[in-house]
Amino acid sequence: MLKLAGYGALAAVLWRYGGLGWAGVVGGITAVYLATGGWKFARIVALTLPRDLHALTSLLKFKMAMKKHARNKTTIPDMFRETVARHPNKVAFLYEDQVWTFQELDEYSNAVGNYFSQMGYGSGDVVALYMESRPVFVAIWLGLAKIGVVAALINFNLRMESLAHCINVSQAKALIFGAELFEDTLLYIYTSGTTGLPKAAVVKNSRYFYMANAVHHLFGLRKDDVVYCTLPLYHTAGGILGVGQALIFGMTVAVRRKFSASNFWDDCVKYNCTVIQYIGEICRYLLAQPSRPAETQHRVRVALGQGLRARNWEHFMERFGIKQVAELYGATEGNVNIANVPGKIGACGFNSAIVPWFYPIRLVRVDEGTGELLRGPDGLCIPAQAGECGELVGKIIQGDPMREYDGYADKQATKKKIAYDVFKKGDMAFLSGDVLMMDELGFLYFRDRSGDTFRWKGENVSTMEVEGAVSRLLDHRDTVVYGVEVPGLEGRAGMAAVADQNNSLDLKKLASSLKQALPGYAIPMFLRLTKNVDTTGTFKLKKTDVRKEGFNPDVISDQMYYMDLSAGTYKPLDSAAYQDIVSGKIRL
């Protein structure tokens, strides 16, 4: 306010005593503003205004469309009926040698709805869906939704305890929702379980529409596009961002039962795909494949997904001839969805640096050891500055479909993801659990899951950075990096679990290469060679279980090694070496 008052006073002086007209006054104030540091903000405006205007226009369109559907109480099945009416004979899904038109999908889903209705199922009941990805999967949950039944989409890879847990959670019939269909629960989609048992995230009709609609318009998808979806249909990326293009916009989606790196580009040629979906490690798997003719014979122009690392970005586009990488970030249950509309290499999205309050998300500082939010003297969270890492949070505004937080079927789990007094006293915000960094132009870069970063030798070690370096040096092998506690030492020592099916790892070469690729404190002190590295259904690397196992060779059956600092290479970690490390005889 003082600066604004100063400019006002300057304008009065120039007008009264300088003999300048309004044009001269404005020019004089502009010159003073730029000379006193305003050029920095002017530069940001010049560089980001087109991006922000595009996003702002799209955001306003989303809000208007969502208000219209909310007013009319429109559901996803209602939108699908309109799609069928527009072009009943257009292809909705391609799967192996099957072709499903929108009319056939409608008829099958109607049969499902009629059957379950006759069996006594109705609004608020839950039916678990446990099968591999195929068009029938969509037809079943769509048919259930038509009669108000909530489908719980279960990960088909789950077994025993995890499977029983998901089914038990979904059978909680006390979760009854309001009478207005637009606000009723459409689906339960389970989190991928990277940090524990999967949780059933609530997906309402409004949220399904918002996510599918945002992707379609922000990244310029066309109604004549053909989407290639190898992702599980029980997760958001495949089941909403992919399938939603067919149900809402009438696009064709080619579905594959499971991802196959060797058949990926052949399928794209076979189905004439123009958009592909990726997530997690899929792009790295494709880059690790030997070259084949199909990888340059396809018609794909857009790669849509989440998790393409900066080091592979340009290589992926150049090798496979992809014109646009549509990288995004979001949480199934949260309200912090962002998109990298301009295609900035390495970024997962942006927020306006000019009017950041318009889309109320923020990076806030956290305690590096505990992951707890840091607060200032006023009790509010401390914003992370440009170039600083912070946890991504989103302001919760009930009644606004874009800002609501619907949480999980488990109410206690829902409460754990809410923070209070974040932007101002009395407010609420969704905690993403993810650490990101924002640059001066507002571009956001994913850094780690909160809690994945560990301290070693007084420095913070990013597991994502080390995983990328190790994997790249080993020709894109699966790698998980985590910190393990060493008795008597502060922090955690780095452990890299590496897939080594053929016992072909050159330890001496790896140690030498890591010294050039990483700072000393970030080089893993331990290696664990395993046949396979566990991943979730969305190709995210699991590390919860291996982190708990530590580095004791009497507990772990995999071959392990430790970094001999004096020799500069990895040596076998047997019981004797383990005892020497614990006693301090061997120093790390």
Image (cartoon, helix red, strand yellow):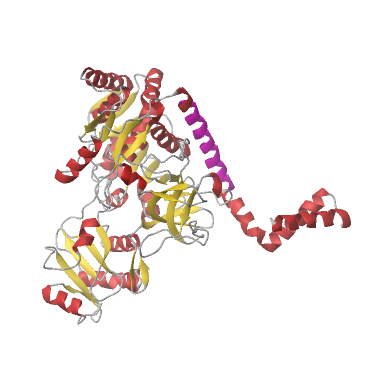
279 to the left or right of 360: left
The structure residue drawn at horizontal position 31% and vertical position 20%, both measured from the top left corner, is 106
In the displayed structure, 574 sits above or below 50; it is: below
Q: Position of residue 347 (x, y in %)?
A: 44, 52
Front residue of 356 and 573: 356
31 to the left or right of 334: right
The quarter of the picture where the C terminus appears is: bottom left
Number of marks in the rendered image? 0
The structure residue drawn at horizontal position 20% and vertical position 55%, both measured from the top left corner, is 533
Question: What range of the chain is rendered magenta?
Answer: 49-69
Front residue of 301 and 388: 388
**Residue 98 seen in this snapshot:** yes
Q: Position of residue 187 (x, y in %)?
A: 31, 33
Q: Position of residue 45 (x, y in %)?
A: 61, 51
Q: Position of residue 131 (x, y in %)?
A: 20, 34
Report the predominant secondary structure element of the magenta stretch.
helix
233 to the left or right of 208: left
Please check the rendered image and state whether residue 58 is part of the magenta-colored stretch, yes or no: yes
